[in-house]
Amino acid sequence: MAEKQFKAESKRLLELMINSIYSQREVFLRELISNASDAIDKVYYKALTDDSIQFDPADYYIKIEADKDNRILKVIDTGIGMTQDELESNLGVIAQSGSLSFKNENEMKDGHDIIGQFGVGFYAAFMVADAVTVITKAYGSDDAYKWESQGTDGYTIEPYEKAEAGTEIYIKMKESTDDEDYDQYLDEQTLQTIIKKYSDFIRYPIKMNVTKSEPKDEESDEYVEYTEEETVNSMVPIWRKNKNELTDEDYEQFYQEQCFGHDKPLKHVHLQVDGNVRYNAILFIPETAPFDFYTQEYEKGLQLYSNGVLIMEKCADLLPDHFSFVKGMVDSEDLSLNISREMLQHDRQLKLIEKNINKKVKQQLLQLQQNDREAYERFYDSFGRQLKIGVYSDFGANKETLQDLLMFYSSTEKKLVTLDDYVSRMKEDQPYIYYAAGESRDRIEKLPQTELVADKGYEILYFTDEVDEFAITMMANYNDIEFRSVSSGDLGIDLDEDDQQATEEADANKALFDEMKTILSDKVKEVRVSKRLKSHPVCLTADGDISLDMEKTLNMMPN
Ligand code: ADP
Ligand code: MG
C-alpha cells in the first residue's frame, strides 16, 4: 500500500490558528519580542562553545519602531538571523520550531532558557497585519533574504541587502475598523505598555524612540518635542536576583510597579525553589484590603511567568481561597504551556507550587503574629475574616493551616488573643473553650449568660463577626478541647450545690412560671429556674449545640 502524506489546507489552517488560539491580539508583540530574544540567546550560546565568537552585550538589543505614516511596526533584533533554508523551514512550515531543535541540540545553562518551542508564535503577527516582511541575515553568512507574506496566500523569499546579522520584521498594520483598533499598535504609549506588561523581564534591552518635551528655554512656557532612544524594559527580573542583595525598598518598589496595591505591603517572602518543580516567587501580604475584597468581583491570583515572559496576569490556581489576599508572582521554567502560552496543559506543577505557597504564607503569618503582634493585628483587621471564611467554607479541611492564625477578643485580656494563648491560660478544672456571640463587645459584656462562666474565672472569647461561630463550629475543637457557647444549655460547670434550693424555688413558683410560659407561648420552649444567674434576673438559654446568635443568623438565611 502506498503511504500518502496528509495535505493540510494551510491557508485555512493558518486562519483558524491565528484567530482561535490567542485571546488577545496584543500578544503578537510578546511573541515577536520572545523570538528576538531567543535569536540573541542563540548567539550567546554559540559564543559559549566557539572561541571565535565574541559576545559583547552592548551589541545585542531589540528595537521597536513605529512608522505611523506608513502604518508599519518594526521589530528589529541583532540576533542570529536565518539562512534561506531556515527561513523556509521555520517560517514556511507551521508548527516547526527552530528554537526547539536548537534546545535539543545544545545544552542549556545558567538560566538562559530559550522561550520558543511550538513554532506558531510568529504567525500571531497576522492577527494585526495585512502583510509581514522578514529581512534577515544569518550570523556568519554573507547573504541576506527577504521573506514576505500576506498570511493566507503562501510566501515569497528573495535575496536582499542587509549589512549586519540579525532580523527585521515589518508589520503592515491592518486598517482600524469599528470593532477593532489597530492604530493603537502604532502608538508609542500603547506599545510601551504592552512591552512592560509581557516583556519587561526579557534580558536584552528593548529600545524605542520615545517622545519627550522640554521648555524651549528657561523663561518660556513653550515646549519643544524631541525623541530619544530609551530602553523600555527592566531586563533583570527582581526574582532572579540574589535575595541578600535586595532591600525591603526594592521589594516595595516592585509591589508598586506591578500595581499589586496602593498600600505598603506588611511582609514579603522571596522563594527560590529548586525541588521537584523549580520556580521563583515573590509573595506579598498586603496591609489593607482592596475595596472589592469581600465581594464577588474580587479576583484572586498571582502573576505567572515562564522564563520571564508573562503568561497569566492572575493565575487563581496558585493561591488557596483562604489566602486570596496574597499578591505577587511565580516564575517557572517547568510549566507545560499550551500553544497559546496562555494556559497550562497540566496542573500537576501548579498544584505542587500552590501547596508550597500555602505552607510559606502560613509560616510568614505565624512569624508576624509572634514577632510583630501589632502589625499582625493590622493584617487581621483587614483579612482575618477571610481566614475564618476559609475555615468555615471548606468544612474544616484547612483547620490545621488556619487555626493558629485566628484571633478573638478576650474577656480577661481585653485584647485579641490566639487560641493557643487562651488554652495556655485555662484553669485546671475548665472543660471547654468558652465563647459568647453578639453584635458588639458591649452587647456581649451585658449578656447575663456570660456571668456564670466569668464568675468561675474562665476566659470568654467574644464573637462579634457573624462568621466567627460558624468557623468555630466547623473546627469543633482546638487541641482536642471543645468550644462551648456561654448560652449553651450545658456549660459543663458543676452547679449541684444549689440544686435543692432551685427545686424548692421552682416548686414554690410553679404557677408563675406556667403563667409566663402561657404569655410567651411559642416564643420559648420552657420557663425554669436558672442556676447560672448572679446579678441578672432572667436570661435566654439555647437547647442543643448552637448558640442563640447562630440560631438567629440561620433563621435569617434563605432555605
Ligand atoms: P517558536 O518561537 O515557538 O519556535 P515561532 O513561530 O515564534 O515559534 O518561530 C518559529 C521559528 O522561526 C523559531 O523557532 C526560530 O527558529 C525562527 N525565528 C522566528 N523569529 C526569529 C528571529 N527574530 N530571529 C531568528 N529566528 C527566528
Ligand atoms: Mg516564538
Image (spheres, helix red, strand yellow):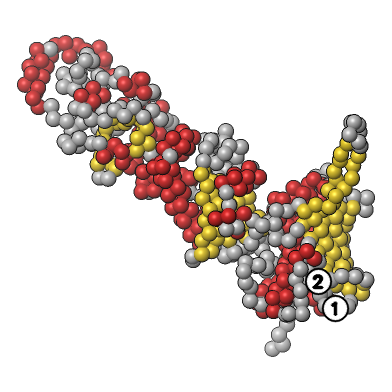
Q: What residue is pinned by disc 2?
A: 81
Residue 24 higher or lower than 15, as above or below: above
Q: Position of residue 103 (x, y in %)?
A: 66, 74
Quadrant of the image for the N terminus? Answer: bottom right
Quadrant of the image for the C terminus? Answer: top left
Residue 421 higher or lower than 557, as above or below: below
Residue 81 higher or lower than 415, as above or below: below
Residue type highlighted by circle 2: Gly
Q: Secondary structure at mark 1?
A: loop
Closer to us: 347 or 59: 59
Closer to us: 166 or 298: 166
Residue 554 higher or lower than 518, as above or below: below
Looking at the image, the residue that sits furthest to the bottom is 1
Work out whether residue 265 can be spotted.
yes
Q: How many marks?
A: 2
Compare marks 1 and 2 and give the one earlier in the sequence: 2
What residue is drawn where x is 86% and y is 60%?
170
Closer to us: 259 or 487: 259
Q: Left or right: where does residue 473 sit relative to residue 382?
A: left
Q: Left or right: where does residue 202 sit relative to residue 249?
A: right
User: Crowdedness of circle 1 by 10 Å Cα count: few (<14), some, many (20+)?
Assistant: few
Q: Position of residue 66 (x, y in %)?
A: 86, 53
Looking at the image, the residue that sits furthest to the front is 218
Q: What residue is pinned by disc 1?
A: 141
**Dividing the picture into quarters, in which one does residue 223 lie?**
top right
Residue type highlighted by circle 1: Ser
Closer to us: 521 or 158: 158
Q: Position of residue 361 (x, y in %)?
A: 46, 49
Q: Are marks 1 and 2 in contact (CB under 8 Å)?
A: yes
